[in-house]
Amino acid sequence: MTAKRKFNIGDRVSVVDKTTLFHHRTQKFTRGQSGVVTEYRPEWVIPEDEAFDPAGNGRKEPFYIVRFKQDDLWPDYTGHHIDTLETEFSESWLEPATSKGKR
Amino acid sequence: MATMQYDKLLTKVRNLSPEERDVLDSPYTIPNELYAALRSVLHDVGGQPDTPQPYFLKEEEDWEMNAYLTSECLAWRGAWNSEMRRRRENDLGATEYFGLPYYARWITGAAKALVDEKLITVDELSAKIDEIRERLEAKKK
Amino acid sequence: MSTRHDGHGHGEAPGEFQIATKVSEFEILELAVRELAIEKGLFSAEDHRKFAEWADGIGPHGGSKLVAKAWVDPEFKQRLLADGTKACLEVGIDWLQPTGSGTPSDYTFFYVLENTPKLHNVIVCTLCSCYPRPVLGMSPDWYRTPNYRRRMVRRPREVLAEFGLHLPEDVELRVHDSNQKSRFMVMPMRPEGTEGWSEKQLAEIVTRDTMIGVALPAPNRKSDTKTETLVSGGRRR
């Protein structure tokens, strides 16, 4: 059941910026951004498949929590430099960190 | 909708659009940028510019809890699942997604799912709606 | 009354409710879907009743109990932080209820986020309104609004300020966008002035908003008073 994970806690990763249609759960504001893996999450059917199968069948992937600096996500962030945001990705949405984000 | 005059309904539908928006009425052609914006998945609202609004709690109506329960029971027994429900809320389109109260989005999506999955037919659904409306209105009198 | 959104909404109810004297079309649609589903054997009336009974029993009191217990019992706190779903069983919350495999919408991956003097957590679901129902009950209506979903990720300190919560500059504000299968609850810090309090007394000040992260518990604060209640017809109470 548990395939080997591609990423480890502490790894710097980027969120893939690819075309999406109809349904997915990878927020636009994370695309092309880089952050750090902070938690592993269990393998589960990816939402892109689950959303189209009444029985909830589909491809399974491990999930990860990634932490971003708010300053990186929003050019006009009005909070403080130490503020962060965490959200979750299935493995195929992540790649080893490229540069510091594309935007 | 049997309870509304046709013209009155048409006017209401026509006025649903937000006051400030790009006018779109099936244009002959659109640029790629607009197409990208149009196919952006509706629920992905995080970070969109918005102004402070008062936050409310609403007194729960019976149908709202029932919409939750019916949606969950349908998923429990395999007619759909919660990710399909969320996808179907997107599939309602912008006007209904942002126009319907929260649980009305759920139950409208559920009705559509049952039709799409061929578990019920549209005419069964509309007949049932008319039957129930009559029953409830008789009870209110 | 116009239902058009003016972009300011000063004192305007966000939308128009079905007029109470008429039968609600939403009530009709829900009943139609439910009756057809039961007639076709998609689920049973008993399923609906059983789910309703479970839903009646959930609420923020579940989370309050977890936090209060963690405040007085450091070992329980460690267990709660290590495996939220499992630790819930100790206060009688079973994430596998009511179906035997959990609710369809909540999954069973529950994580507790601990506030510290240097870290404040807050939850949002920008994509829908994912919320840890088994421990907090149904989400408050404002939590589900596109407005909260839009702004909490990008202007979190401003939204918190609207709730009356002003965090110092040296406290990291961490927003958790609950976008997949994980469900989160914030464990606030135990406030001063509660020394010697019983678990039951402590639970009373752990309100829903403190577990979402938009408020802090205080000895004299036993309810979330920031938001107003709308009743049918859009009137305020």
Image (cartoon, rainbow, N blue to C red):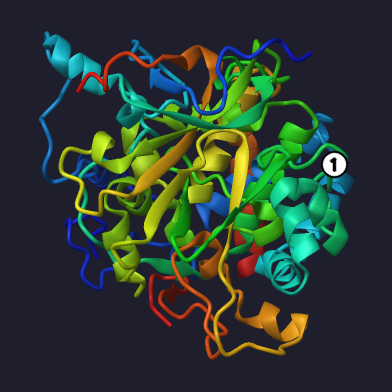
Mark yes or no: residue C160 visible. Answer: yes
Image quadrant of residue A72? top left
Q: Please, what secondary structure does the residue beneath circle 1 have? A: loop
Q: Residue sitting at 80 percent across and 37 percent down?
A: C38
**In the picture shown, does residue C56 fall above or below C155?**
below
Dot 1 amino acid type: Thr
Mark 1 sits on what residue?
C99
Image quadrant of residue B116? top right
User: Which of the pair C129/C158 is nearer the observer?
Assistant: C158
Q: Residue sitting at 51 percent across and 27 percent down?
A: B87
Q: Residue sitting at 48 percent across and 68 percent down?
A: B58
Q: Pinpoint residue B62: horizontal percent, then vertical percent.
A: 63, 62
Image quadrant of residue C17? bottom left
Q: Is residue C130 left or right of residue A21?
A: right
Position of the C terminus of chain C by quadrant: bottom left
Q: Pinpoint residue A46: horizontal percent, then vertical percent.
A: 59, 19
